[in-house]
Image: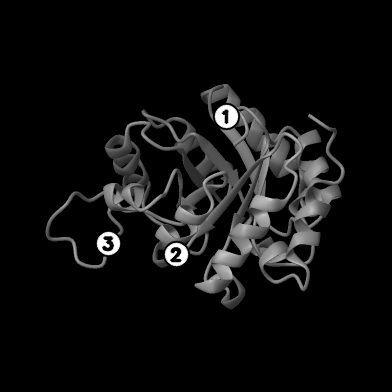
Amino acid sequence: MQSNDAPLVVVNAKTYASAQGEGADSLASLMSQVEAKGVRMVLCVSAFDLSSVAAANANLEVWAQHLDPVGLGSHTGWLQPDTAIHRGAVGTLINHAEHKVEMSHVASLLSQLDGEIPVCACAANLDEAKALAAMNPSPTFIAVEPPELIGGDISVTSADPKIISDTVALVKSVNPNVRVLCGAGVKTGEDVLAALELGAEGVLLASGVTKSADPKGALEDLLSKLPEA
């Protein structure tokens, strides 16, 4: 695995058919084979796939897509953090645009985990990013993702570059230790390079890889514009 301060390429499997079950295993294997060029490669999988994917890909960071701030006990249907970690999760997303939660939910999860694993909290706008950055403990990462661009064909880096640079500036002014990622429509190496040039420290994407006819080629293209480590 790369160092903790390396840029990130975070691939979210969501519930795409191509990235569930055996598809998740295959995608993880491909990500493990790609030359990372000094980039932290992360795959966020369904809770059902955590154990299988993590066990077979020791050199790949495997994150949960969501966790709930609950303990062990009477919490039917909730995603309990200790169990996820036991099954191989070494990080998690929270507050994704497709699974929004209250800010109190995020704060409780951060307190419960207390830095045990990295947490990437998603923000739809500057107000959410500011609220997340001000939490104590804070998220490890804040990913800015304008909801209207998620899953689309236009990258946030070209459709709304100012939201990236403004989020970076705002988050760093509140807590310089929080790293900023960006997502929504990111699909190419040019998109990744543009995100880094705008101040982001990585990208969060899904369909650009998971729905690609050539996911390995898509992954290699995402890294193609970055300088060698």
Q: How many marks?
A: 3
31 to the left or right of 14: right
- Of callouts 2 and 3, which one flags the residue occurring earlier in the amino acid sequence? 2
Helix, strand, or loop for circle 2? helix
Q: Name, please, the residue furthest toward the bottom.
A: 17
- Of callouts 1 and 3, which one flags the residue occurring earlier in the amino acid sequence? 1
Q: Residue at x 70, y 43 (%)?
A: 163
Name the residue tied to disc 1: 4
Which of the 4 image quadrants contains residue 187?
bottom right
The mark found on residue 78 in the picture is 3
Q: Name, please, the residue furthest toward the left.
A: 74
Task: Single out the mark in the foreground, 1 or 3.
Answer: 1
Front residue of 75/215: it is 215
Q: Is residue 129 visible?
A: yes
Q: Is residue 100 visible?
A: no
Name the residue tied to disc 2: 49
Task: Single out the mark in the foreground, 2 or 3.
Answer: 2
155 to the left or right of 31: right
Amino acid under label 2? Answer: Asp
Mark 3 and mark 1 in contact (Cβ < 8 Å)? Answer: no
Mark 3 and mark 2 in contact (Cβ < 8 Å)? Answer: no
Helix, strand, or loop for circle 1? loop
Amino acid under label 1? Answer: Asn
Q: Residue at x 27, y 54 (%)?
A: 80
Helix, strand, or loop for circle 3? loop
Q: Residue at x 29, y 42 (%)?
A: 108
45 to the left or right of 33: left
Q: How is the image coloured?
A: one colour
How packed mark 2 is, by other alpha carbons closer than 10 Å (few <14, some 14-19, many 20 or more), is many
